[in-house]
Image (cartoon, rainbow, N blue to C red):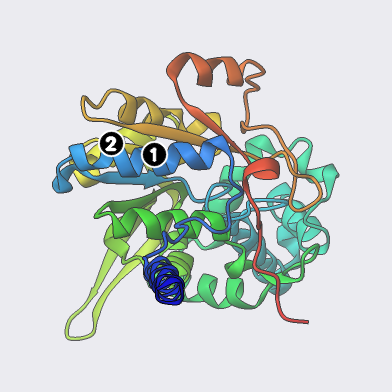
Amino acid sequence: MKTLMYRNAWIFILLLGMATSCAPTKTDPLPSWNNTPEKAKIIDFVTNKVPQIPVKDRIAVFDMDGTLACEAPLWFEMYSAVQGLCLQADKDSSLLQNPVYRYAEKLRVNPKDTSVTNHWGPTIQPMIMNAFKGWDNEKYVKFTKAYLDTAMNRDYHIPLAKMFYPPMLELISYLKVNQFNVYVVSGSLQGLMWSVCPKALGFDRNHLIGTSQAMQPVFHPGKGTEFVLEPAIFKPSNNNNGKAVNIYRHIGKAPVFAFGNTTGDWGMFRMASANPLPNISFMLNHDDAKREYKYSPWHGTPCPAWKDSMSTHGWNIVSMKKDFKVVFNQPNK
């Protein structure tokens, strides 16, 4: 009898173990993130708040430069502009009398040249606007894609077009799985976004909202239409409240999820916060000088009290140093 009881007990334990081993385990949706309170906030929002949001209203917006991808020492748009300006100067050296072209030449040699970056504020827009003026926009898209696919970041030896952050790509995938419509809203030009985002993010052009450069159509019957770039933008640019305007103009409704990396993204944070539906906003703080680049979360006018403003509005700060387990996908060596 005892032998039978022991045998039955072992059978029960074995079956219990099998049942336990066969039980489904939860997969971490954000494996490139450390297990921090900010990661927990994201998962809690998606798990507990998103079910309250109708699928048609599950709109997420992300900044690109510095949020989804590296923007230092230069951002995609400026890397491309430097190359375009230098190609012009290579053909006509008299252009170097213009500081726009001299700056580009210096940055081609050293993207970190502080003799440029310490005081180039008023020159940034002219550099971008003049780099490809007169080009068909589709030619600009193709040129920029080819350039960013091959040009390398000199510090990390990664092609520029691959300098997207794995934690952020995981977050976008996580939101999509939960039936979010995700848009990238960048201060960079629309054509620049069309060049780099479809391959890196798998996004079609309709989900990419960039600053619109002025252009004129040139019709070629039976052969298509060129859109020739002019050195100006259609206002507003995608910065601060301009982001809110362009999100509304493009999507027609407010997001419930917003993610940026500078005070210039606060316009879309405010738009998300004003949404009566459950909402959440995050800012990525570049505080990791070892694995990336450390800099303040603003461009232009300093905002030393930015953390206080974030706290007052209930917006969340993601620390690259603390929250990101991985910053870049390093190339195979």
Judge whether 289 appears above or below 122 on screen. Answer: below
Judge whether 163 appears above or below 332 on screen. Answer: above
> What element does badge 2 sit on?
helix
CA distance for labels 1 and 2: 7 Å
Judge whether 197 appears above or below 178 on screen. Answer: below
Observer-nearest of 25 and 42: 25
How many marks on residues? 2
Residue placed at 44% from the left, 60% from the top? 193
- How many residues crowd mark 2 within 10 Å: few (<14), some (14–19), many (20+)? some
Are the residues flagged by discs 1 and 2 in contact, CB closer than 8 Å? yes
> What element does badge 1 sit on?
helix
- Mark sitting earlier along the chain (1/2): 1
Residue placed at 19% from the left, 37% from the top? 52
Please name the residue that numbered disc 2 is placed on: 49
Q: Amino acid at mark 2?
A: Lys
Q: Position of residue 327 (x, y in %)?
A: 66, 56
Observer-nearest of 100 and 160: 160
Q: Is residue 30 left or right of residue 329?
A: left
Residue placed at 72% from the left, 57% from the top? 104
Observer-nearest of 44 and 192: 44
Observer-nearest of 167 and 84: 167
Q: Position of residue 42 (x, y in %)?
A: 43, 41
Q: Position of residue 314 (x, y in %)?
A: 44, 20
Q: Amino acid at mark 1?
A: Asp
Q: Is residue 244 left or right of residue 151?
A: left
Query: From the image, which quarter does the C terminus lie in?
Result: bottom right
Query: From the image, which quarter does the N terminus lie in?
Result: bottom left
Please name the residue that numbered disc 1 is placed on: 44
